[in-house]
């Protein structure tokens, strides 16, 4: 069931959602008390944020499903809607989110039943969050189970094997044991790196990018080994897996995808206007000349150094352009950059700096003033 209404994310889980989920469960278990379930779901729900609402729905499931967990999870599995046909609309199954939370909160003492239920759930809505407590507390058994699913015919299941063990999954708790020792993850990534579905390969690349934050040498070693396979699918994974290292200017990562240290590059960078208000945009301009006697492959980015609230500066690398520049050739680039407040970035008036980065090297910089909006 797709969510169409333009309303706050947390309000996806309201009385209407509780009724819908109650009807879904009730269709598989006639004795299920749908009215009691809805009352528990929406009790004092208004001030609750998204995660708290999902947990309250899961708690309502625990209160109204059969007391014996294996019986309860059997009902839940029977109630699940048909498997999603597509791979890019996983949030269409958002109503199943509390189902995963129910398994995570109440199913750890029943490993086999819970893992089987998550394998079914992930075909409707990803079980990547639900499986994380199992990865944390029953690691060996969980990975043994996931290894058996690496050739599952359903791409949602194969993706789950990678996505569920990402060490730094957005919205998920960090998996500290795997951050310390990621060795159980490598067999999964090795098996799925050339999966037929880009949906699955993207998860592999994201998993690798997470690992590169803590184990860059191991990630580089795997990518170098994978590169020997001369596969376009694997090359795509490598490029996206190394994106964090590439943005950070890691010379080995850049060389692996064909961008060596720039030689004899002349460059200037400017911004217009030099004073811009919060909420407005500025234009970043660059003139780049290849002053060497050979063509060079260039990966061009720019870095914005944001003023902190007190003294700490924050920086972010923005992708710009990839090109081959012939010997003696020049190119002029322009790009609009918004200076808008976002949910993940606060802005503070004051001096800011922009740097031009080519193949991981800073080659020019300029400053501008950010004014109150």
Image (cartoon, grey):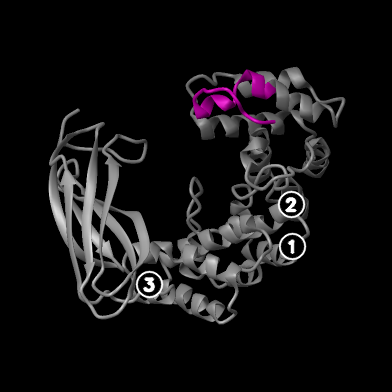
Q: Residue furthest right?
A: 30
Q: Nearer the viewer, residue 218 or 66?
A: 218
Of callouts 2 and 3, which one flags the residue occurring earlier in the amino acid sequence? 2
Q: Is the residue under label 2 in contact with that under label 1 (CB below 8 Å)?
A: yes
In the picture of the structure, the residue carrying the numbered disc 3 is 254
Residue at image x 29%, y 47%?
335
* Numbered disc 1: secondary structure: loop
Distance from disc 1 to disc 2, alpha carbons, whole Å, reads 9 Å
Residue at image x 69%, y 38%?
99
Q: Residues within 10 Å of mark 2 (few under 14, many from 20)?
A: many
Disc marking residue 121: none
Residue 295: x %, y % from top left: 32, 76
Disc marking residue 119: 2
Residue at image x 22%, y 40%?
282
Disc marking residue 149: 1
Quarter of the image where one finds residue 68: top right
* Numbered disc 3: secondary structure: helix
Looking at the rendered image, the disc whose residue lies closer to the viewer, 2 or 3, is 3
Residue 326: x %, y % from top left: 31, 72
* Numbered disc 2: secondary structure: helix
97 versus 115 height, above or below: above
Quarter of the image where one finds residue 336: top left
Residue at image x 23%, y 43%?
283
Distance from disc 3 to disc 1, alpha carbons, whole Å, reads 33 Å
């Amino acid at each position: 069931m797709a969510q169409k209404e333009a309303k706050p994310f947390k309000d996806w889980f309201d009385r209407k959602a509780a009724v819908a989920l109650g009807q879904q469960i009730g269709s598989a278990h006639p004795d299920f008390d749908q009215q009691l379930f809805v009352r528990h779901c929406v009790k004092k729900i208004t001030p609750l944020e998204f995660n708290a609402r999902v947990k309250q729905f899961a708690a309502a499931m625990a209160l109204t499903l059969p007391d014996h967990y294996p019986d309860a999870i059997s009902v839940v599995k029977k109630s699940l809607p048909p498997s999603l046909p597509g791979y890019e609309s996983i949030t269409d199954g958002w109503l199943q989110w509390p189902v995963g939370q129910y398994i995570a909160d109440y199913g750890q003492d029943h490993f086999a039943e819970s893992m089987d239920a998550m394998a079914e759930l992930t075909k409707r809505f990803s079980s990547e969050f639900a499986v994380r407590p199992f990865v944390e507390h029953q690691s060996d058994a969980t990975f043994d189970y996931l290894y058996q699913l690496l050739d599952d015919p359903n791409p949602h299941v194969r993706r789950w094997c990678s996505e569920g063990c990402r060490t730094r999954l957005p919205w998920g708790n960090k998996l500290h044991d795997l951050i310390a020792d990621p060795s159980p993850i490598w067999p999964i990534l090795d098996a799925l790196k050339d999966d037929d579905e880009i949906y699955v390969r993207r998860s592999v690349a994201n998993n690798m990018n997470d690992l590169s934050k803590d184990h860059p040498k191991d990630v580089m070693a795997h990518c170098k080994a994978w590169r020997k396979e001369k596969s376009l699918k694997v090359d795509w994974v490598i490029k996206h897996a190394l994106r964090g290292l590439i943005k950070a200017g890691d010379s080995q990562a850049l060389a692996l995808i064909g961008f060596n240290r720039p030689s004899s590059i002349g460059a200037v960078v400017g911004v217009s206007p030099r004073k811009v208000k919060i909420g407005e945009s500025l234009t970043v301009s660059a003139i780049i000349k290849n002053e060497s006697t050979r063509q060079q492959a260039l990966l061009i980015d720019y870095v914005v150094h944001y003023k902190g609230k007190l003294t700490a500066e924050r920086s972010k690398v923005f992708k710009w352009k990839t090109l081959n520049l012939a010997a003696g050739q020049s190119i002029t680039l322009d790009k609009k950059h918004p200076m808008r407040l976002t949910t993940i970035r606060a802005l503070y008036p004051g001096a800011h700096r922009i740097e031009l980065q080519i193949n991981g090297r800073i080659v020019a910089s300029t400053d501008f003033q950010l004014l109150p909006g």
